[in-house]
């Protein structure tokens, strides 16, 4: 009985070894199929990814423009002469410049409407692909932005 038992165990071990050798790795055909699938997916995904990065960069410029306008609205409510406000806003606009966009400031007008304007122009990857204008009226709280996906600046937004 023990001989039969040991022969049965030996046969099971040999069978298991043979099965393990067959199940150890992938065949060349399986690997080639995976490589082809990954290549197709990357060919489809790469252009979409690149367009999304441009959109994200443009969004950063728009966000910075909004931050400048918000700060200009707060500065416009503070006391001080128009020249002091303009000097402060020049420093604010300069601090927001980045490698993606350049901001050009208008000035607080000395008139009763006291509107402040900012123009944003794309740099680097956004060169000739992004331009925006924004204005804020601290007296009324109106803040508007106009964005264009080309070199021609958008129409002036009205913050009156």
Image: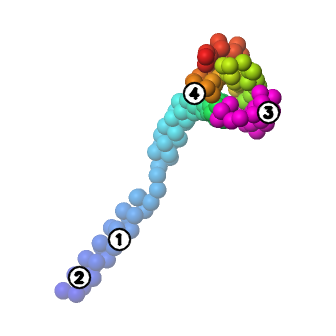
Alpha-carbon neighbours of circle 2 within 10 Å: few (<14), some, or many (≥20)?
few
Q: Which of 102 and 36 is in front in this view?
A: 102
Alpha-carbon neighbours of circle 3 within 10 Å: few (<14), some, or many (≥20)?
few
Tag in front: 3 or 1: 3
Q: Earlier in the sequence, mark 3 or mark 1?
A: 1
Q: Is residue 150 above or below residue 89?
A: above
Badge 2 vs badge 3, beta-carbon distance below 8 Å? no
Where does the image place residue 32, in percent across and percent down from the top left? 51, 41
* Magenta part of the chain: 74-100
Question: What secondary structure predominates along the stretch shown in magenta?
Answer: helix
Where does the image place residue 108, in percent across and percent down from the top left? 73, 24
Picture residue at 77% right of the left edge, 35% below the top: 88
Badge 4 vs badge 1, beta-carbon distance below 8 Å? no
Residue 160 falls in which quadrant of the image? top right
SS under mark 2: helix
Q: Mark 4 = which residue? A: 141
Q: Mark 3 = which residue? A: 84
Could you give the CA–CA distance between mark 3 and mark 4, rounded to whole angstroms? 20 Å
Tag in front: 4 or 1: 4
Badge 3 vs badge 1, beta-carbon distance below 8 Å? no
Q: Which of marks 3 and 4 is nearer the N terminus?
A: 3
Where does the image place residue 106, in percent across and percent down from the top left? 75, 22
Q: Mark 2 = which residue? A: 5
């Amino acid at each position: 009985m023990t001989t039969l038992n040991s022969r049965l165990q030996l046969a099971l071990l040999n069978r298991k070894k043979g099965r393990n050798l067959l199940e150890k790795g992938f065949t060349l055909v399986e690997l080639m199929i995976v490589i082809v699938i990954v290549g197709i997916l990357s060919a489809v995904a790469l252009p979409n990814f690149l367009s999304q990065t441009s959109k994200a960069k443009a969004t950063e410029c728009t966000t910075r423009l909004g931050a400048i306008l918000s700060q200009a609205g707060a500065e416009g409510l503070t006391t001080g002469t128009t020249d002091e406000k303009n000097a402060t806003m020049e420093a604010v606009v300069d601090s927001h410049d980045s490698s993606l966009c350049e901001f050009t400031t208008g000035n607080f007008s000395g008139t009763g409407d006291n509107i402040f304007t900012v123009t944003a122009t794309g740099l680097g990857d956004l060169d000739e692909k992004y331009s925006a204008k924004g204005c804020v009226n601290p007296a009324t709280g109106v803040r508007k932005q106009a964005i264009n996906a080309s070199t021609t600046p958008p129409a002036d937004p009205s913050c009156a």
